[in-house]
């Protein structure tokens, strides 16, 4: 019989939780390049093809896009989800219209992971230049080649396994991404293999790899009733991403939004610039805070994680100019 943590992961993935082995990615002909200004404001099925493999993704091009430099957000779904489900649940496409932001939704294949989880816990996907990080970065670069994107406004965010992989991308491609959003995720390198992954998810293991000089700005959301990924993992993501000993003491704010209270801790650098925000949503489980019921793994109550992430991304990109 599986222990409770394996049961939770199996429920999340809706498959045998041991079926995590990486498989071969299918290779197909890349879609033809299209003029960005003529594309409709809907999700477009796309595929990245490289010598190392391929990756399907959905792309949202807002109607507000005119061919002038726009922002780009890469959104990494959680286990058992796909790009369309994640878009519906987060409502990020609606915000993209407001902020003139393209949104790419890379999609994990069941051949690479039986539960369609990003393999954040495997050593082969911890580094730059290979594995899933290289493919996801390739999606961002492909969109930047095909559309007019402001390189100072390229962001990445994700939920659960996608949140953990977003942290990996922020640490391995800091020259590509400008800020990271992690919802219910884990720190880079906190696990190698399934056993350590379960340990980290259940108990909130040490952060793993040490803080990096010049780490990217980071916003973290985590429900304090999350029984799938322990809330201590949110602390680990923050501790790994910013050297707290070199920052001003965190400013703590409390509040309430649509029926849930929250605690927001803001970490600033010596210059006063915001380096990280940590949102703890009280009473929330393993779900996107303030999400839409049309998508899976969402909590309609609580602060709007999508809105706060987009607000954070735009603020930190402006303060870095």
Image: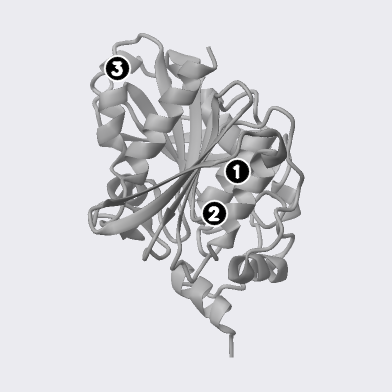
Q: Residue 65 carries which label?
A: 3
Residue at (51, 64) in percent of width and height: 115
Q: Kindly check if marks 3 and 2 are in contact, taking CB atoms under 8 A apart as contact.
A: no
Looking at the image, which residue is at 35% across and 14% down?
Answer: 35
Up-down relation of residue 42 to residue 86 (above or below) = above
Foreground: 105 or 312?
A: 312
- The answer to whether mark 1 and mark 2 are in CB contact below 8 A is yes
- Determine which quarter of the picture holds residue 27: top right
Gap in angstroms between the C-alphas marked 1 and 2: 8 Å
Check disc 2 and report the residue beneath it. Answer: 185
Residue 259 x/y as whole percent: 24, 59
Is the residue marked by circle 1 packed among few (<14), some (14-19), or many (20+) residues within 10 Å? many
Image coordinates of residue 47 in percent, x first then y, are 48, 35
Q: Can residue 29 be seen in this view?
A: no
Q: Residue 56 carries which label?
A: none
Precedes in sequence: disc 3 or disc 2:
3
Q: Give the numbered dot on residue 167.
A: 1
Mark 1 or mark 3, which is nearer to you? Answer: 1
Helix, strand or loop for disc 2:
loop
Q: Looking at this view, name the residue that lies furthest to the top.
A: 68
Distance of mark 3 from mark 2, alpha carbons? 31 Å
Q: Do the residues labelled 1 and 3 touch (CB within 8 Å)?
A: no
Residue 186 falls left or right of residue 10: right
């Amino acid at each position: 019989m599986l222990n409770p943590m394996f049961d939770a992961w199996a429920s999340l993935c809706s498959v045998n939780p041991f079926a995590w082995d990486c498989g071969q990615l299918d290779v197909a002909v890349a879609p033809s390049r299209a003029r960005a200004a003529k594309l409709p404001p809907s999700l477009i099925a796309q595929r990245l093809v490289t010598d190392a493999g391929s990756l399907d993704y959905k792309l949202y091009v807002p109607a507000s896009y005119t061919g002038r430099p726009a922002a780009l957000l890469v959104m990494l779904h959680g286990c058992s989800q796909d790009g369309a489900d994640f878009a519906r649940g987060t409502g990020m496409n609606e915000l993209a219209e407001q902020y003139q932001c393209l949104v790419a939704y890379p999609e994990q294949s069941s051949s690479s992971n039986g539960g369609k989880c990003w393999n954040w816990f495997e050593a082969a996907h911890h580094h730059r230049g290979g594995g899933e990080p290289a493919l996801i970065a390739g999606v961002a670069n492909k969109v930047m080649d095909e559309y007019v994107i402001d390189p100072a406004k390229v962001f990445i965010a994700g939920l659960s396994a996608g949140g953990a992989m977003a942290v990996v991308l922020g640490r391995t491609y800091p020259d590509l991404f400008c800020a990271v959003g992690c919802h219910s995720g884990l720190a880079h390198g906190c696990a190698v293999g399934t056993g350590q992954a379960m340990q980290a998810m259940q108990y909130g293991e040490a952060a793993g790899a040490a803080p990096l000089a010049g780490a990217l700005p980071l916003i973290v959301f985590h429900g304090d009733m999350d029984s799938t990924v322990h809330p201590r993992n949110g602390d680990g993501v923050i501790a790994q991403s910013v050297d707290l000993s070199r920052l001003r003491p965190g400013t703590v704010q409390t509040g309430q939004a649509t029926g849930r209270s929250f605690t927001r801790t803001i970490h600033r650098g010596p210059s006063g610039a915001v380096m990280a925000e940590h949102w703890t949503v009280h009473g929330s489980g393993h779900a996107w805070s303030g999400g839409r019921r049309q998508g899976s793994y969402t909590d309609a109550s609580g602060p709007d994680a999508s809105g706060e992430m987009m607000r954070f991304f735009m603020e930190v990109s402006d303060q870095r100019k």
